[in-house]
Image (cartoon, grey):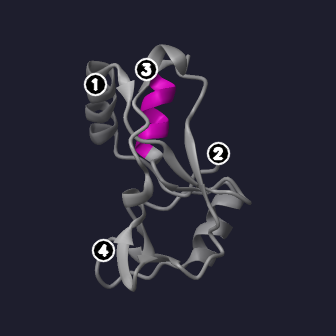
Amino acid sequence: LKEHEEIRPDYLEQLKNEILSDGILKMPIAVDKKTFIILDGHHRLHALKKIGCKRIPVLLFDYQSPEIEVLPHREGETVTKEMIIRTALAGRRMPPKTSKHMILIKGELKHISVLEKDVNIPLDQLK
């Protein structure tokens, strides 16, 4: 899996503790099916690695689809699919929460996580 954003250590620790407390991974990580670039789930990936998981459930998307758009998290910033692809493939990272991946559903833009249905996989199955 290829990352394009840094993580926030404080949020990583909080998420790791939440996953450990639940004993399950609730949602898979959204990934481009061609490049394996993470679209949503950088913190989940790092939390699972810290827990010792070797298997990472993913949901594959076609990042080239016109239905998938990327928006900046912060007003006044610019981020494009091309920027994300270049950054990830070069092994570099953008600041945490730079991008927000959206998907067009029935004419309305929604965060891509609406398609990341609960998988509720016990952690011991991921180790």
Q: Which residue is mark 2?
A: 1
Quadrant where the C terminus sits is top right
Q: Is residue 54 visible?
A: yes
Q: Determine the main secondary structure of the stretch shown in magenta.
A: helix
Mark in the foreground, 1 or 3: 3
Pointer 1 with pointer 2, Cβ within 8 A: no
Q: Earlier in the sequence, mark 2 or mark 4?
A: 2
Extreme residue toward the right, this view: 34
Quarter assignment of residue 84:
bottom right
The tag earlier along the polypeptide, 2 or 3, is: 2
Which residue lies under the disc numbered 4?
A: 74
Q: Tag on residue 80?
A: none
Marked residue nearer the N-terminal end (3 or 4): 4
Q: Identify residue type, mark 4.
A: Arg
Q: Is residue 124 left or right of residue 83?
A: left
Of labels 2 and 3, the one closer to you: 3
Q: Is residue 49 magenta?
A: yes
52 lies above or below 47: above
Label 3 amino acid? Pro
- Relative to 51, say whether 91 is above or below: below
Seen at 71% across and 60% down, the residue is 89
Q: Nearer the viewer, mark 1 or mark 4?
A: 1
Label 1, on which residue?
A: 17
Where residue 11 appears, x then y in whole percent?
Answer: 28, 41
Give me the C-alpha separation between circle 3 and circle 4.
35 Å
